[in-house]
Image (spheres, rainbow, N blue to C red):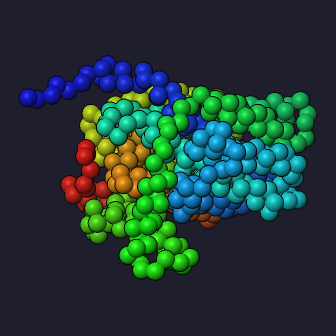
Amino acid sequence: MIEKKQTWSESLLVYKDIRMLRILLLGAISGFPWVLIASSLSLWLKEEGLSRSTIGWAGLIFGVYAFNYLWAPIVDRIQIPLLTKKLGHRRGWIVLMQIAILVSLVVWSFINPTENLALLISVGLIIAIASATQDITVDALRIEQISANEGKSMAAGAAMAVVGWWTGYKLGGVIALFTAEYFQNIGISDYWQTTFLVLGVVVILMNIGLMFVHEPIDSDREAKQKETDKMIGEKLGSSNIFTNFIAYITGTIGGPIISFFKKNGYSIAIGILGFVFLFKIGEAFLGRMSIVFYKEIGFSKGEIAIYSKTLGWITTVVFTLLGGIFAMRSGTVKTMFVAGGFMAATNLLFALLAWTGKSDLLFALAVIADDISAAFATVAFVAFISLLVDRTYTATQYALLASIGTAGRTTLASSSGALVDWLNGDWGTFFIITTIMVIPSLICLWLIKDKIKISAK
């Protein structure tokens, strides 16, 4: 019997599940810290007179997102005193990291960037570490909202997580930019420092919302972890501190890696990792310097907030939901190719904007196109790596693949400011280069597309 394919309207009904609202909030909690260490920090440093190269290299703090898989097992195992008992294992970790972010914002409110740049970046690094750590448990809590056999709900959940992330990032950016501009207009000299106190209030509100997210009870997780350690320990022979440590490392880090290569084969696994690493580098180069470009071409903070944040958020929400349905109906691999083409075309629009000069219409078109491509790319990417993971090692493998993807976007893109300086501020050529950066990842995907072992392509 052939199963009838759902209509688009029937597919949309999946989003009515109350669990999707919880996943939306979790996504917003993940996305908001990027407002602090991406657009807000970049514009703050720009308005303090620091160079593009300095702003670009400051983005190296994003590198911690590329390595959060290293401590993912710790987040899975260690319980937070008081918080775990009161809130649950996942929510306890999220609240602890939110507290770290809140304290960091308070510290930022007392810093002068030109006098204490090293301290400012160090505090930004703390925010990045806290954010990268909470992402581990946010992803786990998101997955645990839905049963493993609910395929369509899991795909819808991936889309809602992306919508939530962009909601936290875009609307958080609107709050940051309008608040900073307001404080600047009324004559507050340290307007960015004051703005960070307002953003601290947003962090508090998100923690209140987190209390409404249900955390499923998993009473046997710890027992299964210890059982795995015991099995590995027995194979190592005598039991002592050293062998117990080796068993822990092997079970939590080595096991997932061995499983990944065994499942896919060495050559295909390398192709997958190459694609994951390269896929969004061009977008990252553009994104890291975009707000600096907007400022240099003549747009005010208010205009940036309206076009890049508010308008961009609406576009992202709509096309992320549509992208989720497209991925469910057409397959994640096909969606990846479509998203890659969108990303390349979008970067060409930014090049055109750079060559023609300030234009509200072209700016709006470029931002809309950028958000459409980002929406499709992110939904497909999240679904893709979710399908690749071995359910035996879901948390660690997901964190590993996500970290490799982040590594490409953060470590290499940190040189974006230096590249613009090397081009003597030739933004048009810069955006052409970011367009070319999309191609290698699509070549990797083309070479492995028929050999990837996932349930839906």
Q: Is residue 369 above or below residue 71?
A: above
- The x and y percentages for residue 390 are 34, 54
- Residue lying at the far left of the rendered structure: 1
Q: Position of residue 202 (x, y in %)?
A: 72, 33
Q: Quadrant of the C terminus?
A: top left
Q: Nearer the viewer, residue 18 or 132?
A: 18
Q: Position of residue 175 (x, y in %)?
A: 71, 31
Residue drawn at point x = 79 percent, y = 56 percent: 120
> Dividing the picture into quarters, in which one does residue 329 lie?
top left
Q: Left or right: where does residue 123 sit relative to residue 263? A: right
Horizontal side of residue 261 vs 281, given as left or right: left
- State the quadrant of the N terminus: top left
Give the image location of residue 291, x and y in percent. 65, 44
Q: Against 197, is 314 above or below?
A: above
Tell me what residue is drawn at x 54 percent, y 50 percent.
136
Decide if residue 348 is in sight here: no
| Residue placed most toward the observer, 181 or 331 | 331
| Left or right of 404, for residue 68 | right
Residue visible at 59% across and 41% down in the picture: 88
Q: Quadrant of residue 156?
A: top left
Q: Residue at x 42, y 62 (%)?
A: 228
How many dots with numbers? 0
23 sits to left or right of 133: left
Whether residue 218 is visible to the viewer of this picture, yes or no, is: yes
- Judging depth in this view, the residue of 329 and 190 nearest the camera is 329
